[in-house]
Amino acid sequence: MRTLSQQIAINAAIDAIRNAEDALTDQIRSSTDALTAIKLTNEYNNLDSYLSELLHAQNAADDATFANATEALQSRISGLEADEKAIQALIADVATAGKVIGYIADAVKLIAKI
């Protein structure tokens, strides 16, 4: 059975990924360079994949499904960290990049705790 701390970590990771997606959406919309916008959209899609997995774990009906979902999330942490680096390289504004990276870093820490 999932613990309260696991549920809190999942909920907080969901919030962090959504906040990162919101910030990326703002960057995509304000981008004047089509190639950068496309690359940011690809990174958004990667984050959305993690969000789907987090939501799957959050809504798992039984312990086995929850365990499998969280194991899958944890096995993809290195990919999420790679996305951090890619996003940081794409966003020219240091403050905005730091904000997005901060959200993703929070999600990584939270996923590791599940």
Image (cartoon, helix red, strand yellow):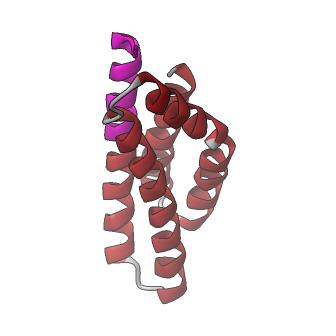
Q: What stretch is highlighted in magenta?
A: 1-16
Which residue is at 52% across, 32% downward?
A: 70
**Residue 48: x and y, percent?**
42, 57
Which residue is at 42% across, 54% downward?
A: 96
Which residue is at 38% across, 68% downward?
A: 27
Q: How many marks?
A: 0
- 34 to 53, vertically: above or below: below
- Residue 5: say if magenta: yes
Which residue is at the front of the view, 22 or 75?
Answer: 75
In this picture, residue 82 sits left or right of residue 99: right
In the image as oriented, which residue stretches furthest toward the bottom? 34
**Residue 47: x and y, percent?**
47, 55
Residue 83 visible somewhere in the drawing: yes
Which residue is at 54% across, 27% downward?
A: 109
- 2 to 31, vertically: above or below: above
Which residue is at the front of the view, 17 or 60?
Answer: 60
Which residue is at the front of the view, 79 or 68?
Answer: 68
- 97 to 7, vertically: above or below: below
Q: On the rendered image, what quadrant is the N terminus found in?
A: top left
- Residue 91: say if magenta: no
Q: Main secondary structure of the magenta part?
A: helix
Q: Residue 7 occupies which quadrant of the picture? A: top left
Residue 92 visible somewhere in the drawing: no
**Residue 10: x and y, percent?**
38, 29
In this picture, residue 85 sits left or right of residue 36: right
**Residue 113: x and y, percent?**
53, 20
Q: Residue 5 occupies which quadrant of the picture? A: top left
